[in-house]
Image (spheres, grey):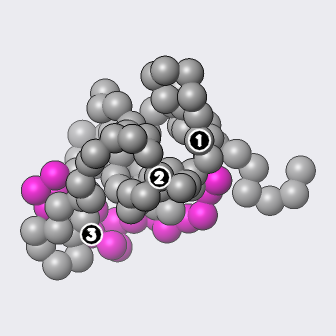
Amino acid sequence: MPVLEDERGARDAPARDEPGRVGPGRGEGPVDTEVEWVYQPVEVHFGDGRWALGRISGWWQDAGGSRWCRLRVARSGHPARWEPFDPARVVLLPAGGL
């Protein structure tokens, strides 16, 4: 499972090899019509014990059945990118009233 980068990590935005395609490397990933666009606040946990707030703006499932999320870590300076969803590292927070 890839490690989520934090504000100190250097990672490029997802490749855009074909119009309408975004996702993990070399244009692989969802066509916009395959994405469930959402606004989901999250808490992102890093391997060194730190955490940051962020948001998921889209959900997608690849042909192998893996679930991906379009994740942006707040104040990281990096754009949103597709990441495999790992519920142990990306904790969903309430989006509405409690």
Q: Among all residues in the image, which is located at the extreme bottom? A: 19
Instruction: State the residue position of label 3.
Output: 31
Kindly indicate whether the residue at mark 2 contacts the one at mark 1 (C-beta within 8 angstroms).
Answer: yes
- Res. 52 mark: 1
At mark 1, the secondary structure is strand
At mark 2, the secondary structure is loop
Expressed as whole percent of the image width and height from the top left, the position of residue 79 reads 38, 62
Q: Write down the quadrant of residue 29 in the picture.
A: bottom left
Kindly indicate whether the residue at mark 3 contacts the one at mark 2 (C-beta within 8 angstroms).
Answer: no
Between residue 80 and residue 56, name the one nearer to us: 80
Give the residues in magenta. 25-42
Instruction: State the residue position of label 2.
Output: 76
Q: Alpha-carbon neighbours of circle 2 within 10 Å: few (<14), some, or many (≥20)?
A: some
Identified by mark 3, the residue type is Val
Between residue 98 and residue 78, name the one nearer to us: 78
Residue that appears at 60% across and 64% down:
39
Residue that appears at 34% across and 66% down:
34
Q: Write down the quadrant of residue 55 in the picture.
A: bottom right
Q: Nearer the viewer, mark 2 or mark 3?
A: 2
For residue 11, above or below residue 66? below
Q: Alpha-carbon neighbours of circle 3 within 10 Å: few (<14), some, or many (≥20)?
A: some
CA gap, disc 1 and disc 2: 9 Å
Say which quadrant the N terminus sits in. Answer: top left
